Image (cartoon, rainbow, N blue to C red):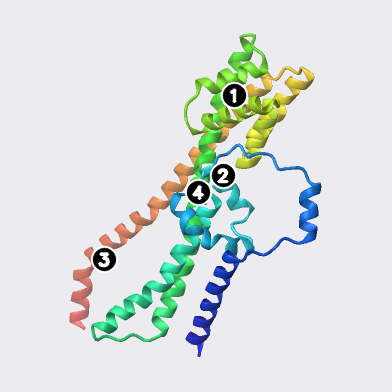
Amino acid sequence: MIPALLFGAGTGAGLWLLLTWTLPPAPTLSDRLAQVGSRPPATPIAAAADAAWVRRWGRVFAPGLRMLGLPGTKIEADLRVTGRGVDTHLASKALPAIAGLLAPWLLGALLALGGLSLDVEAPLLAGLLLAALGFLTPDLDVRAKATRLRRESRDALSAFLDLVGITLAGGAGIEAALGDAAAVGAGPAFDKIRRALHAAQLTRTTPWNTLRQLGEEFDITELAELAASISLSGTEGARVRASLAAKAQALRTHQITDAESDAQAATERMALPVTLLFLGFLGFIAYPAVIQVLNGL
């Protein structure tokens, strides 16, 4: 009874996904009125493109998963940091889940052709476990990559602040200092800053607004704080060179703290293999004596 119910639920979910792909639900009147009355959203600075295979096959699963509220605001921010499209991420969640669900049954069919038979419960439980693992693994991978890229962006931001401070000390204006400092640096973080400054030139807006937007898109609070400090110089004429130097020093202190915590975590992880090796060595030494005692009994 339980396998039949699960098969029926899986078939219904698959048909529902196909139906939402072929016949997407029409928006309600309130949604239409909200779209008419609201301002158009700002063009995102971060470029996230979908893979070619997603444009062909992955969009089958995207509408149904979006209706479930996936991928979530936090994962969307992580996807913008990594440069992966939302449809690509949803497809990378759905396809491994389906493959993990069907793989035990295909293995069971091959074993049945060889004359071996398995119970229904074993492929069912293995399929559900593999499906859950395949569905959650892309989220964990994106989160780990986004954390690493945010840390690298904070490290590059401290160097960017130093360059801006040096250019300001030379008598340049705030906008010229931002452009010159971004042009000197290299790496993904400086590429994103240059893209934000270029977007400010194209849209004829202030560079601190695009930097604030970039910090909100990437969920980097230090970049948004930098934009707030620079805006004081651009709008009210405040001298922010000392403030930028203090922020750069704080970022370097935070970077040192993170490096020390990573080193301590690595040291703690090394304690387990050393302990197991020590226990194995003790067992190797004590084995002859234990065997002699047992044989004497």
Q: Using the numbered discs, state the Cα–Cα distance from disc 4 to disc 1 in whole angstroms.
A: 33 Å
Nearest to the observer: residue 58 or residue 76: 58
Helix, strand, or loop for circle 4? loop
Q: Disc number at residue 28?
A: none
User: Nearer the viewer's eye, disc 4 or disc 1?
Assistant: 4
Mark 1–mark 2 contact, CB under 8 Å? Answer: no
Q: Which residue is mark 2?
A: 80
Q: Which residue is mark 1?
A: 161
Mark closest to the chain's N terminus, 1 or 2: 2
Image spot of residue 218 (x, y percent): 60, 41
Q: Residues within 10 Å of mark 3 (few under 14, many from 20)?
A: few
Mark closest to the chain's N terminus, 4 or 1: 4
Mark 3–mark 1 contact, CB under 8 Å? Answer: no
Q: Which residue is mark 3?
A: 283
The residue type indicated by label 3 comes to Gly
The residue type indicated by label 2 comes to Arg
Image spot of residue 282 (x, y percent): 27, 62
User: Nearer the viewer's eye, disc 3 or disc 1?
Assistant: 1
Task: Look at 50% across and 48% down and name the residue there.
Answer: 50
Label tally? 4
Image spot of residue 1 (x, y percent): 50, 90
Nearest to the observer: residue 240 or residue 30: 30
The residue type indicated by label 4 comes to Asp
Q: Residues within 10 Å of mark 4 (few under 14, many from 20)?
A: some
Q: Residues within 10 Å of mark 2 (few under 14, many from 20)?
A: many
Q: Is residue 29 above or below residue 291?
A: above
User: Nearer the viewer's eye, disc 4 or disc 2?
Assistant: 4
Q: Using the numbered discs, state the Cα–Cα distance from disc 4 to disc 3 in whole angstroms.
A: 55 Å
Helix, strand, or loop for circle 3? helix
Nearest to the observer: residue 15 or residue 269: 15
